[in-house]
Image (spheres, grey):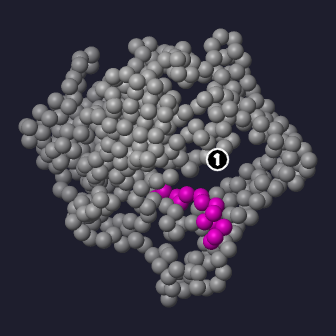
Amino acid sequence: MAVDWSRRGYHAQRWAARGALAAAALAVSTPLVYGGLRGLLLLVCGIAGVGLSAAAVWWTLTLRGPLRWVSALVAVCVPAGLVALFAVTLFWSLPVSLALWGLAVWSGRFALRGTGGGQAQMRERRLPPPRRPVLIMNPRSGGGKVGRFRLREKAERLGARVVLLEPGEQHDVTALARAAVADGADLLGAAGGDGTQALVAAVAAEHDIPFLVISAGTRNHFALDLGLDRGNPAACLDALTDGVELRVDLGFAGEQPFVNNASFGAYAAIVQSPAYRDDKIGTSLEMLPDLLTGQQGPRLVARAGDTTLTAPQAVLVSNNPYRTGDPFGLGRRERLDSAALGVLGVKLEGAISAAALLLNPEPSGLTILTATEVVVEADRAEIEAGVDGEAMILPAPVHCRIAPGALRVRVPRRRPGVTQAPPRLDWRRLRKLAATVGRTAAPSRLHRPYEAPHGPWPPAGPHAGPGGPDEPSGRNEPAGPRSGHQ
């Protein structure tokens, strides 16, 4: 009976794959057929316009004076003109094409579900609530979220001791966290930006005690990838009484910990400027021409495994890789426990290279890979870096590494951002799925829920996941790849 059910599900997915391919073909052909020769000319104009817009953006960033403003005008007007031209020329075929693309995406993801195209959620385990939690709160972060959401009052009602950073004073957050552990704290938490989170998290990992993330910063990227409620940081405190624990990785740039990323190159140099905090756009426009053309800043060399990036304008090393193949998931990390650093390097040599970033499926100026260690060298003794958004000067070379499963993060059991990531749209796999025939093609266990193996915490082995429920959380955890290799 289970085999028949699995086969029926597989046949539905096979037909969904065929529907996705058909919808994609119709999405391309509809405006071309409707427009005839004009449709082909519009396609050529669209490609040329995209390339010209990318080149104009490069000129805007690397030129000064009147030429910069002319380039900026081209970068804005060309895309707007293309949209207007397509709308006037193609009429009803344009929205029909967009609707068909939406159908193709939905059908394709339905077809690929359960075939290994998605990512498994991080494993959870239930542990008793902490007895002596200590929370470090920065009242200035996020425009005053600590006071606005009454985080201190709620934390103290739940039995936590709160260390409030006094505005206008310099604080050694690492020393405060270590003092709390020496005083008997069995959980450390931080309400502040990602830079503050990383410092407290490193102390928690050092002493192997849980860490609580309170999304009281401005962007809260780490909280976002943990599935926490960024709109209501007070909800993060529910983890003190009704929480589960995740094992996640922690990144290091030299001796500096990071929960999100460490950047080197143009952005890292810009954030060092004293004027950047008061005038971000003006400072960036003033410094970018010299930084992007190599007239200012260090000449970087980044080594990751067998890959060497020579003289890139920017290098981003992230704690687990960011999504790159899905436009709806850019800036998100599918996992925080893949035991791999994400590496993104950008090297542009002119307007043509900038245009190739958009027109070439595999542009030479963009490097995306994963590694367990990255070494960033420079032609000087120190390198400017941005570590979780904090401007720093690090001694060269900078050795970036990842500590797999080093951080125990306590989070609320119910988190609004925890969703199963949809499978990646792989058109090659869709074609293979659509082309299969016969009943023997259907695997009997295609749709069965994944049953997590029970074992020691954490599992042994160099590629084992950092999870392993001592006390199962009651959720079925679907199987999926353990890393974000591109």
x and y, in percent, of residue 95 in the image:
77, 49
Tell me if mark 1 has few (under 14), some (14-19) or many (20+) residues whose alpha carbon lies within 10 angstroms of its own: few
Q: Is residue 476 above or below residue 422?
A: below
Closest to the observer, 162 or 108: 108
Is residue 250 found left or right of 65 in the rendered image? left
Q: Quadrant of residue 76?
A: top right
Closest to the observer, 146 or 76: 76
The answer to whether any part of residue 439 appears in the image is: yes
x and y, in percent, of residue 50 in the image:
72, 36
The residue at which mark 1 appears reads as 361
Closest to the observer, 312 or 411: 312
x and y, in percent, of residue 341 in the image:
39, 46
Is residue 308 found left or right of 25 in the rendered image? left
Q: Is residue 82 above or below residue 120?
A: above
Is residue 320 found left or right of 73 in the rendered image? left
Closest to the observer, 239 or 111: 111
Query: Which residues fall within the magenta stretch?
Result: 420-433
The answer to whether any part of residue 8 appears in the image is: no
Dot 1: what SS?
A: loop
Of all residues, the one furthest to the bottom in this rendering is: 1
Q: Residue at x 34, y 31 (%)?
A: 397
Is residue 109 found left or right of 81 in the rendered image? left
Q: Quadrant of residue 196?
A: top left
Q: Residue at x 78, y 39 (%)?
A: 46
x and y, in percent, of residue 393 in the image:
33, 23
Three-letter residue code for mark 1: Pro
